[in-house]
Image (cartoon, grey):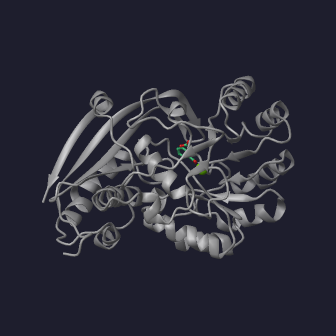
Amino acid sequence: MSSNQMKLERVELLRLEMPLVSPFRTSFGVQTARDVLLVVAHTTDGAVGYGECVALAEPVYSEEYVDGAAHVLEHYLVPAVLACEDLTAARVAELTEGFVGHRMAKAALELAVLDAELRQAGMSLAAYLGGTRERVPVGVSVGITDTIGQLVETVQRYREQGYGRIKLKIEPGFDLEPVRAVREAVGPDVPLQVDGNTAYRAADLAHVAKLDDLGLLLIEQPFEHDAIALHAELARRCRTPICLDESITSAAATARAILAGACSIVNLKAARMGGYLEARRAHDVAQALDTPVWCGGMLETGLGRAANLALAALPGFALPGDISASARYYAEDLTEPFIMVDGQIEVPRGPGLGLTVREDVLGSVLTERREIRA
Ligand code: OSB
Ligand code: MG
């Protein structure tokens, strides 16, 4: 075996119930806690790696959901990888490509193997991916509220905490008026963007295009994931850049969306496209097409956020990411807490994800543990 090749001895699937500091409402519904699935890879040499699966509890952001991800990992993906005698993270995608879809589950497994590989090699994930920055600018994603007053108050609280860029979740019935109220409250210079999470339909085109008057940095995914032509038509009607999230399921999908004129900015989420290695390829495609990217989030714990910070250290990440400080999500994070300084968070430099799991916190939120052996 060459030096970076490994064999897995066992894989643990951990389920955690992490209470959120405040409910997070999108057009998909409300989340009050994060139902986290962690993949822990143990190699025969004693190396350990962690991968956080970002699938939500219900199949509303994409077809994946956390019970389904746990099932496909236990019965299909993990056995395929456990059987490999000369494993590297780069091989996980080919070992599991016979199983269709399940990109978030595959991404979590690949990340666990990659973390183990890099911890063994003493290299950080940022260095492995080709990150060039030591800290990255971040923003905050603000959920839908019952009243416009509550939204303005929430945004002002985040502004006081130092968040430079604000993203507002919108849906039909909660869009022009609340966004205009926030714009008036924060003034013309604060970078503001919106995210429709696929809640709008073709008949809403003219209405969505009215967001163009609000001085937004970008409009994220108002229409369904496969509505490429519709997003391209919106882009023709707006000066505001259109950004896609749910549509971007691979590096190839990144190229297709950009070349179709459906977006001029891309929200990169590694898990949505099957892993950090595919996300790196999507970043390179976007760079080749002169299209800026930024790093999206899925309310990750510190482990998933460490990986996102490493990705966001790449040169094409020209806009602040949805990578907020630990305190925005969890009273007790799974890792040492991430802190924001001057609107930026430091990229971890230790081997692999570069952080340790706080076993006391893990013990207090653990709801289920399964082990799969070779
Ligand atoms: O669309 O970016 C999204 C959370 C869950 C599902 C989809 C999205 C989000 C967020 C959270 O916006 C951003 C974050 O993790 O801070
Ligand atoms: Mg989004």
Query: For residue 158, which quarter of the picture?
Result: top right
* x and y percentages locating residue 365 in the rendered image: 32, 30
In this view, the residue in front, 323 or 273, is 323
In this view, the residue in front, 340 or 56, is 340
> Ligand 1 is located in which of the four quadrants?
top right
Number of marks in the rendered image: 0
What residue is drawn where x is 37% and y is 55%? 352
In this view, the residue in front, 231 or 20, is 20
| Res 338 seen here | yes
Query: For residue 188, which quarter of the picture?
Result: top right
Which quadrant of the figure contains the N terminus?
A: bottom left
In this view, the residue in front, 30 or 371, is 371
Query: For residue 282, which quarter of the picture?
Result: bottom right
Q: Is residue 78 left or right of residue 229?
A: left
Q: Is residue 356 left or right of residue 245?
A: left
Q: With respect to residue 337, does 125 lie above or below?
A: below
Q: With respect to residue 57, does 236 lie above or below?
A: below
Which quadrant of the figure contains the C terminus?
A: bottom left
| Res 250 seen here | no
* x and y percentages locating residue 361 in the rendered image: 33, 30
* x and y percentages locating residue 40 in the rendered image: 26, 49
Q: With respect to residue 359, does 84 lie above or below?
A: below
* x and y percentages locating residue 328 in the rendered image: 55, 32
Seen as rendered, the residue at the extreme left is 374
Q: Is residue 122 left or right of residue 327?
A: left
